[in-house]
Amino acid sequence: MYQNIPTKVLTGEVRLSYAHLSEPYANPNQANSEPKYSVTLLIPKTDAATKADIDSAIRAAYEAAVVNDWKGARPQLRSALIYDGDGLRNDGGKFGPECAGHWVITASTKRKPQVVDISNINCDLAPQDIYSGMYARVTLNFFAFNSNGNKGVGCGLGNVMKTRDGEPLAGGASAASDFAGIGQAVAPGATLPGGVATQSQYGAPAVGQPMGYPAAGPAVNPITGQPMGGINPITGQPM
């Protein structure tokens, strides 16, 4: 229970997976799938309090529906809402390695959730700061439904508060790893990625200067050894 609402939960710190929080998403594998904002939460099994709160909220939503919506019927729920990440999916497949040691639950909503940072809960995060793999605390709202005779309990997504960054789960590299060492001070004589040498203390060509060619400078008269250009003070002729 959160804020005295039996069906509402504020999780402890969880990790986000399959995060679609900036734009609604429709599952292409489901016919007539309606676009929704959604996210899968990876809840550490050590967080017994969050697991207990979720179980209690599911029961509260179920019991309220028995009395108010299902006319006393107590249907068996066709599928679980929260899964053991060390077990198997409904289709018999294994969960990803990031799910090991976690409870797994997916929440969704038609309404765009607010996603804020723990350092400033009054300002929404930019889309680029929201990604699968980050850590957050999330509010969930459990509700009963009765759709074409299919009775059950669903998990609604409330809002998200980012607590810290984490290793992205999307499989892409971060900019920091892609551009490590570029645009930063490099010691003389060091070698950048790709084998490009910087200017050394012994006068080796600097980055961007063609190897084997001297730097451009004033032309020299091959006879007198004097720089070309100007007027010879003795002859009055151009040098």
Image: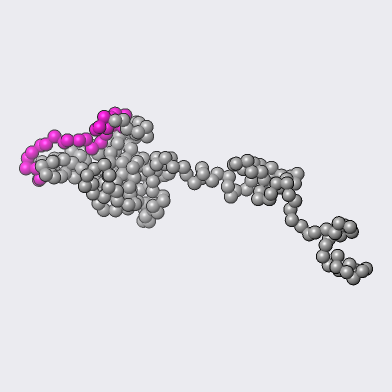
Q: Nearer the viewer, residue 62 or 93?
A: 93
Residue 5 in view (yes/no)? no
Return the residue nearer the eye: 195 or 137.
Answer: 195
Q: Which residues are magenta?
A: 68-92
**Left or right: 24 in relation to 208:** left
**Colour approach in the figure:** one colour
Where residue 31 appears, as percent x and y from the top left, is 22, 44
**Side of 214 where 175 appears, left or right:** left
Can residue 26 be seen at all in this image of the molecule? yes
Asked if residue 231 lies in the magenta stretch, the reply is no
Main secondary-structure element of the magenta-colored stretch: loop
Front in this rendered view, residue 126 or 25: 25
Residue at 34% from the left image edge and 52% from the top image edge: 22
As drawn, the residue found furthest toward the left would be 71
Total number of numbered discs in the rendering: 0
Farthest right residue in view:
234
Q: Residue at x 49, y 46 (%)?
A: 175
- Foreground residue, 217 or 73? 217
Image quadrant holding the C terminus, namely: bottom right
Q: x%, y% of residue 132?
A: 37, 43
Q: Where, by quadrant of the figure, is residue 225 drawn? A: bottom right
Q: Is residue 83 magenta?
A: yes
Decide: is 19 above or below 78: below
Q: Residue at x 26, y 29 (%)?
A: 92
Residue 131 is situated, as x and y percent measured from the top left of the image, at 38, 46
Quarter of the image with the N terminus in it: top left
Tell me what residue is drawn at x 18 percent, y 41 percent. 153
Percent across and percent down for residue 226 are 86, 60
Q: Quadrant of residue 56?
A: top left
Q: Is residue 73 left or right of residue 60?
A: left
